[in-house]
Amino acid sequence: MTIPATMRAIDPAQPGGPDVLQVVERPVPTPGPGEVLIRIHAAGVNRPDVLQRMGLYPMPPGAPTIMGLEAAGEVVALGEGVSTLAVGDPVTALVAGGGYADYVAAPAVQCLPVPPGMRFAEAATLPETWFTVWANLADLATCKAGESLLVHGGTSGIGVTAIDFAKLFNLQIIVTCGTDAKCKAALELGATHAINYRDGDFAPVVRDLTGGKGVDVVLDMVGGEYFPRNLASLKEGGRHVSIAFQKGNRLELDIAFLMRRRLHVTGSLLRPRSAAEKGTIAEALRTHVWPHFADGTLKPHLFKEFPLDQADDAHRLMESGGHVGKIALTLEA
Ligand SMILES: NC(=O)c1ccc[n+]([C@@H]2O[C@H](COP(=O)([O-])OP(=O)(O)OC[C@H]3O[C@@H](n4cnc5c(N)ncnc54)[C@H](OP(=O)(O)O)[C@@H]3O)[C@@H](O)[C@H]2O)c1
């Protein structure tokens, strides 16, 4: 196929509301060494995209300004030294930017196959949340079968992926959500317990649900005043992993509490990590997770898809919090 010189893309000139997400023309990228050029059929929408659009996300140096952290399509060209993929391969890729476009150059090591029978729009929604959940629950928190987990935002893209992770690796998972309907949805997806955080403090409920002990691991995307309540929800020696701080990143902490309960506090950001590190996560996902999409144990959680020129509506939906799972943009020509 002929690769055009220019393409459609969403690359806002300045931060702002959803209205800044207009389709513009940009040059088609050239794949560098170790990269492949993907003709995109669909891109995933993630909360960090909303923060980037608002000008609230510090971009890693060198990341494309075109929005979008994940995309699925077929490989149309190979950069120097790529031998693991071929032109025509259907892939879904984690990218540091550039997904809201017709083409993206992605490191080959960050590409995973589109699982058999899965639509591009569904496959496009897998990388960002699966790479994040794996990096934090498997690698940092070293979750093991039989352990228990507390995850806020139980119906977020991250939350539904954490529920799948817990089901796959035999962990008990307690989630919090902001409505009874979202709690019901999380339970239907396989959460062990779901707490409506608007009904009161979740920490005593978590302690009750765990026989007074607390959970082994908290995966937190809220921060602020949730932090001490998360620590109070952990058992002795428990691990706290931060991936976001929607309620603020500064707080006062009682160091004596950490010491008495021998707690571990850590966190991570996926986007600025090197291609080699992301490639290591991709290999783990290829081995331990992707076969379960092929055998039907795992399913994608695509809530709604929008054409590229309705990316503003996709962001409005995400900001309304009306979704359960993931949102995608489609790029059929
Ligand atoms: N560190 C990393 O590498 C990394 C990578 C990807 C994503 N993230 C972060 O992970 C989070 C989820 O991303 P996503 O794309 O899955 O977003 P999403 O689907 O839009 O979900 C955001 C979630 O935040 C929850 N939330 C907001 N305020 C809350 C509060 N006060 N208490 C409890 N929950 C609250 C919402 O739950 P309710 O609607 O139930 O209130 C919602 O489910 C985002 O903050 C994102 O920035 C971090």
Image (cartoon, grey):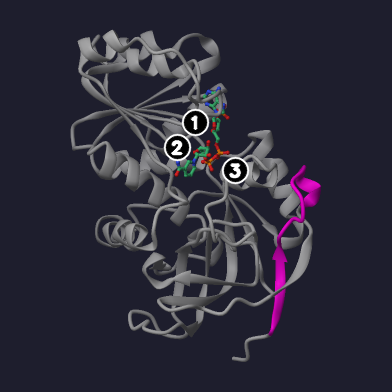
Ligand 1: does it lie within 8 Å of the C-beta at label 2? yes
Category of crowding for the residue at label 1, using alpha-carbon neighbours closer than 10 angstroms: few (below 14), some (14–19), many (at least 20) = many
User: How far across and how far down the image is residue 234, in percent?
Assistant: 29, 18
Residue annotated with mark 2: 159
Q: Residue furthest front?
A: 61
Mark earlier in primary sequence (3, 1)? 3
Nearest to viewer (mark 2 / mark 3): 3
Category of crowding for the residue at label 2, using alpha-carbon neighbours closer than 10 angstroms: few (below 14), some (14–19), many (at least 20) = many
Question: Range of the magenta residues?
Answer: 5-20
Ligand 1: does it lie within 8 Å of the C-beta at label 1? yes
Amino acid type of the residue that numbered disc 1 sits on in the rendered structure:
Gly
Residue annotated with mark 1: 153
Category of crowding for the residue at label 3, using alpha-carbon neighbours closer than 10 angstroms: few (below 14), some (14–19), many (at least 20) = few
Amino acid type of the residue that numbered disc 2 sits on in the rendered structure:
Gly
C-alpha separation, residue under disc 1 versus residue under disc 2: 6 Å
In the foreground, 323 or 319: 319
Circles 2 and 3, Cβ within 8 Å, touching? The answer is no
